Image: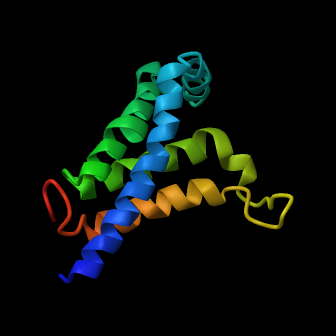
């Protein structure tokens, strides 16, 4: 792999992981947000414990992605997290556009497809454990 490919993957990993980590930090610093997530999980008839998977998808996985340690798995975990978020919270927005004409779920889609992209392309050479 050439240096520019690895640099591009590093920039992608830092962007995806760094921006997702802000969501996780928000959940850690605002524990009341977990009440909302737990409520949504319960509405679906699932065990409340599954709500805490958000910490895996928004804290652990982004850290894995940022440092490049099992980055493919981190990307998969982010994609799973975003799929769950879409099903639990955003299903009503699937066909909606926002005020500027963009898709209402473009942020969620960027995280979901970014995670999937990382799953398939790997971390690049500038990683704690290149794959």
Q: Who's the residue at 25% across and 50% down the image?
A: 67
Rendering quarter of residue 6: bottom left
Image colouring: rainbow
The residue under the point 53% across, 17% down is 31
Residue 98 sits in quarter: bottom right
The quadrant of the picture occupied by the N terminus is bottom left
Quadrant of the drawing holding the C terminus: bottom left
> Toward the viewer: 38 or 29?
29
In which quadrant of the rendered view does residue 43 lie?
top right
Question: Residue 37 at x, y = what percent?
Answer: 57, 27
Q: Give left or right: position of 41 versus 72.
A: right
Tell how many labels. 0
Q: Residue furthest left?
A: 129
Compared to residue 38, the image places residue 128 above or below, namely below
Q: From the viewer's side, name the closer residue of 123 and 39.
A: 123
User: Residue 55: image x %, image y %?
Assistant: 40, 31
Q: Residue at x 25, y 67 (%)?
A: 122
Q: Residue furthest right?
A: 99
Answer with left or right where residue 86 lies relative to residue 52: right
* Residue drawn at 38 percent across, 64 percent down: 11
Asked whether, in this view, residue 99 is left or right of residue 48, the answer is: right
48 left or right of 2? right
């Amino acid at each position: 792999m050439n240096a520019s490919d690895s640099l591009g993957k590093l920039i992608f990993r830092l962007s995806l992981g760094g921006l997702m980590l802000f969501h996780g930090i928000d959940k850690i610093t605002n524990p009341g947000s977990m009440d909302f997530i737990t409520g949504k999980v319960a509405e679906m008839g699932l065990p409340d414990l599954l709500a805490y998977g958000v910490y895996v998808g928004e804290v652990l996985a982004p850290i894995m992605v940022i440092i490049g340690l099992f980055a493919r798995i981190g990307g998969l975990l982010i994609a799973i997290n975003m799929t769950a978020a879409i099903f639990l919270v955003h299903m009503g927005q699937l066909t909606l556009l926002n005020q500027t004409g963009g898709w209402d779920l473009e942020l969620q889609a960027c995280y979901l497809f970014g995670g999937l992209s990382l799953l398939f392309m790997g971390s690049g050479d500038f990683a704690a454990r290149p794959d």
